[in-house]
Image: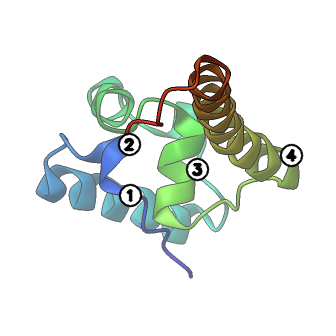
Amino acid sequence: MKVHNYNRTRFGDRDPKEMARLVKLLLDIEKQLGRTPKKSDLSGKDLGAIRKCFGKWCYALEVSGLQEPSPETIERRLNRKTKVGRKKAAKKERIRQKFMLQGISQPE
């Protein structure tokens, strides 16, 4: 199984040992049941720890390699990142044009 390696911005402040324990727990449950675990397959304590560590249930399944993100999810995540990049580029262009109109050399 492919285990996703998420960047540290999403899960950077989480304890890596706790994340590893929870991923192992999900993989053990999957092996035991022979299917992807559901929230109802976990005890309240473990489910709370997963929510605290990963946020959403689908993130826990993606990190553990039990579920691939859907193409729509991947596209949405990519668009979210590029949208921010487009906004920054547009802002830089507006600033550049403003300085050009005023005849001032562009700041570096």
Q: Check disc 2 and report the residue beneath it.
A: 10
Q: Between marks 4 and 1, how big is the CA–CA gap? A: 20 Å
Give the residue drawn at x 30%, y 36%: 53
Task: Work out whether 68 lies above or below 60.
Answer: below
Dividing the picture into quadrants, the one containing residue 30 is bottom right
Q: Secondary structure at mark 4?
A: helix
Horizontal and vertical percent for residue 6? Answer: 43, 59
Label located before the other in sequence (3 or 1): 1
Front in this rendered view, residue 40 or 56: 56
Label located before the other in sequence (4 or 2): 2
Give the residue drawn at x 75%, y 52%: 74
Three-letter residue code for mark 1:
Asn
Horizontal and vertical percent for residue 41? Answer: 51, 40
Dots 2 and 1: beta carbons under 8 Å? yes
Label located before the other in sequence (4 or 1): 1
Question: Where's the N terminus, which quadrant?
Answer: bottom right
Three-letter residue code for mark 3:
Pro
**Mark closer to the observer (3, 2):** 2
Near mark 2 (Cα within 10 A), the count class, few <14, some 14-19 or many ≥20, is: few
Task: Work out whether 8 lies above or below 108.
Answer: below
In the picture, the disc for residue 37 is 3
Q: Between marks 3 and 1, how big is the CA–CA gap? A: 24 Å
Q: Check disc 4 and report the residue beneath it.
A: 72
Q: Secondary structure at mark 3?
A: loop
Q: Check disc 1 and report the residue beneath it.
A: 7
Front in this rendered view, residue 18 or 40: 18
Horizontal and vertical percent for residue 90? Answer: 69, 31
Label located before the other in sequence (3 or 2): 2
Label located before the other in sequence (3 or 4): 3
Q: Between marks 3 and 2, how big is the CA–CA gap? A: 23 Å
